[in-house]
Amino acid sequence: MSSAHNVTQLLLRWNNGDDAALERLMPLVYEELRRLAKRYMVRERLNHTLQTTALVNEAYLRLIDAKHVRWQNRAHFFAISAQLMRRILVDFARSRNYQKRGGELRQVSFDDGLIVLDTPDRDLVALDEALRELTAVDERKGRVVELRFFGGMSVEETAEVLGVSPDTVMRDWKFAKVWLLREMSR
């Protein structure tokens, strides 16, 4: 049985109230959660007080409290995990009393799925706000950015989570990059 299938089966059992399934699930997903957290933390300032392990642990605590989520599969689990990690970091940045936009912020480039963050906390808050605006205009395009950029998912994985074709994901991805660049350069 494949790892993805095992994860999906354990998620479904956890949905149905099997707490033992959660205990068996975590060792299977922990390294992937660490990979997601490292992807986020690479963009943070060097002296960031929140470490990779703490980000994984905080996301884990929020995941186990998410009783209302009806897990669909492995990809859905990691999409939600990526979203939670993004929210944790944005909340952390906001709590450090950084300006939301303007002021000392510098323009952020958004090029082929790679963002160079010169002032990570402030830029993360600005990116989060621009992404929220995009999601308000077109929810699917916002989810594509969240899954691809923040979640590290492939085009195919993103298409699976969203229930659309890979071509649709690529069109949404291209549009979203241009839209976010325009919004963040204002």
Image: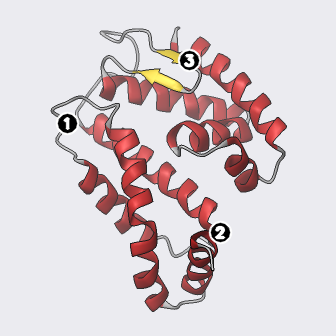
Disc 2 to disc 1, C-alpha distance: 33 Å
**First of labels 3, 1 by sequence position:** 1
Mark identifier at residue 6: none
**Percent position (x, y) of residue 79?**
57, 54
> Pointer 3: residues within 10 angstroms few (<14), some, or many (20+)?
few
Q: Nearer the viewer, mark 3 or mark 1?
A: 3
In contact (CB < 8 Å): disc 2 and disc 1: no
Mark 1 Cα shell of 10 Å, populated few (<14), some (14-19), many (≥20): few
The relative height of residue 38 versus residue 59 in the rendered view (above or below) is above
Sequence-wise, which precedes: disc 2 or disc 1? 1
Mark 3 secondary-structure assignment: strand
Residue at 58%, 78% (x, y): give it. Answer: 6
The local secondary structure at tag 1 comes to: loop
Q: Is residue 24 above or below residue 165?
A: below
Above or below 79: residue 118: above
Q: Residue at x 32, y 16 (%)?
A: 118
Work out whether residue 23 or residue 129 is closer to the camera in this orientation and state it: 23
Secondary structure of the residue carrying tag 2 is loop
Residue under pointer 3: 111
- Can you identify the residue that label 1 sits on? 48
Tell me the kind of residue under disc 1: His
Instruction: Work out whether residue 59 can be spotted.
Output: yes
The amino acid pointed to by label 3 is: Asp
Residue 125 figure quarter: top left
Residue 49, position in %: x, y? 16, 41
Q: Residue at x 80, y 54 (%)?
A: 163
Q: CA distance from mark 2 to mark 3?
A: 30 Å
Residue 102 in the image, given as x and y percentages of width and height:
39, 11
Q: Which residue is mark 2?
A: 73
The spot of residue 83 in percent (x, y) is 50, 49
